[in-house]
Amino acid sequence: MENISEKKTLRREDERKKLINRLKRIEGQIRGICGMIENDAYCTDILTQSAAVNAAINAFNKELIGSHIRGCVVRDIKAGNDEVIDDLLSTLQKLMK
């Protein structure tokens, strides 16, 4: 990972649990793909599962970016920190690669 920020985001407990549960499901999907490879599963079956993981990661990212915009970005703009917009644009560019 690159550019790990020193900034923190305080999340509500329910929000934290929701994000962690999503990631644990994705982790399980990845383990399933590893098992498929270990068991010599057919390539297209593995690719189908890989596509499902990509969709799950995209859904996670959409949820997190929405939360970031509604929370962190709005808070910083209200506080007069307009450079948060550049940070947001940079983050969106990374997600769209």
Image (tube, rainbow, N blue to C red):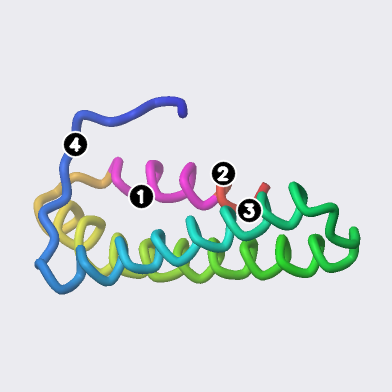
Within-10-Å neighbours for mark 4: few <14, some 14–19, many 20+ = few
> What residue did someone put label 3 on?
96
Q: Earlier in the sequence, mark 3 or mark 4?
A: 4
The quadrant holding residue 8 is: top left
Give coordinates of residue 7: x percent, y percent: 19, 36
Q: Earlier in the sequence, mark 1 or mark 4?
A: 4
> What residue did someone put label 2 on?
94
> What residue did someone put label 1 on?
85
Q: Report the magenta stretch's main SS.
A: helix
Judged from the image, the secondary structure of the residue bearing numbered disc 1 is helix
> What residue did someone put label 4 on?
7
Give coordinates of residue 68: x percent, y percent: 29, 60
Could you give the CA–CA distance between mark 3 and mark 4, rounded to whole angstroms? 23 Å
**The magenta stretch spans which residues?**
83-92
Is residue 85 located in the magenta-colored stretch of the structure?
yes
Residue farthest along the front direction in this orientation:
39
The quadrant holding residue 67 is: bottom left
Q: Nearer the viewer, mark 1 or mark 4?
A: 4
Q: Residue at x 55, y 68 (%)?
A: 56
Judged from the image, the secondary structure of the residue bearing numbered disc 3 is loop
Could you give the CA–CA distance between mark 1 and mark 3, rounded to whole angstroms? 16 Å
Could you give the CA–CA distance between mark 4 and mark 2, rounded to whole angstroms? 18 Å
User: Along the line of sight, which residue is nearer the eye, 45 or 8?
Assistant: 45
Q: Earlier in the sequence, mark 1 or mark 3?
A: 1
**Amino acid type, label 2:** Lys
Q: Residue at x 57, y 54 (%)?
A: 31
- Against 20, residue 88 (above or below) is above
Residue 74 horizontal side relative to residue 3, left or right:
left
Could you give the CA–CA distance between mark 1 and mark 4, rounded to whole angstroms? 15 Å
